[in-house]
Image (cartoon, grey):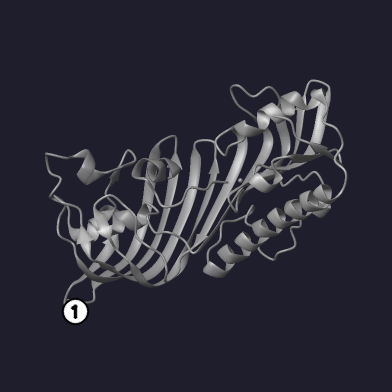
Amino acid sequence: MKKIVRMLGGALVLLVMIIALVSCDDNVAPNDVSFDFTKTLPKTRSEAEAAIDSIEKDMKAIKDALDNAKKGTLAPYKEEFNDLIGDLPGLNPYMSGTESYWFGLYSDSSEINHYGITDAPVTSATGFFADKTKGAHSDITIIVDTKFKINAVMEGKPDIRGSYEISLNGSYVEDAGIIVPIASGTLKKTDVPTWSKSLTTADVLLDEGKYKWDKNKGENEDNYEPHQRILTVFMSLSLTSEKAAMKVFYTSAKDEGVKGEFVSGYTVHGEGGSWTSATWKKGDKQYTFLYSDTEDYDDVIIINEVAYTVVT
């Protein structure tokens, strides 16, 4: 699904995940919320919100620790940290040895962003999405009830303007590029009361990570119904979220060009950057650290409970 989002220019640009949550300091990784998203993906909006709240607690704990470190005297940087510091920019959710989670809540201020629609504000929305990815395998849930209006379409695209209401229960399994969608629900055109369509998996027009009407451009690109196009847009995560969070967990994470290995811990993505609590090792060297790549904290890192200046 992430491949779809990247190819289609999806609205969200954040990412995250784990098998086992291993933190460098239990006090830095509170996990006291009632819903544990590492065991099962949210099935309700309240569970998705609880998952987001727990991730935000982790981010706040790291931020508070770095804030306290900056209030004191930072220890001089040591050259022995060079490989660790050099590996930090390479941290990403697609490294081997990672498991990531990504959650979002839909709201009345959401917008529909996708190729073919230029103006589609949402007037009322409830729902959420949840995404778990490990390696080439992703599980995605999309639950949404929303009212929206398509005011304009791009030149050359079918005229699907109008006011709509959609109720969608959708999910994906993606494995090594093979995408298996499941969808059910209804789509109504509220300004044409007699227009109502049942939504099924067969109406999801995605093929190898692309919209079928784009893939078949010049052939049968006009043979797809408006309800199929709209369902496909929602199933490709093209609705922006009111609140979102991403978390990547590390279990022996390493990639090409990375000098060492992130043997445990996690990264939270949000507030303009990332926040990491993890353990890194190379040979007989091993360091547990707290770090953020956000502008306010790019000059400090806590390594083995000592705060140091960062040299890049």
Residue 69 position in % (x across, y down): 83, 48
At mark 1, the secondary structure is loop
Q: Residue at x 17, y 76 (%)?
A: 192
209 over 192 or under it: above or below? above
Q: Residue at x 34, y 63 (%)?
A: 184
Work out whether residue 183 or residue 248 is closer to the camera in this orientation and state it: 248
Residue 29 visible, this orientation: no
Q: Circle 1 is placed at which residue position?
A: 193
Residue 172 position in % (x across, y down): 42, 50
Q: Quadrant of residue 170?
A: bottom left
Q: Amino acid at mark 1?
A: Pro
Residue 67 position in % (x across, y down): 78, 52
Residue at the bottom extreme? 193
Residue 223 visible, this orientation: yes
Q: Residue at x 31, y 55 (%)?
A: 233
- Quadrant in the picture for the N terminus: top left
Q: How many dots with numbers?
A: 1
- Quadrant in the picture for the C terminus: top right
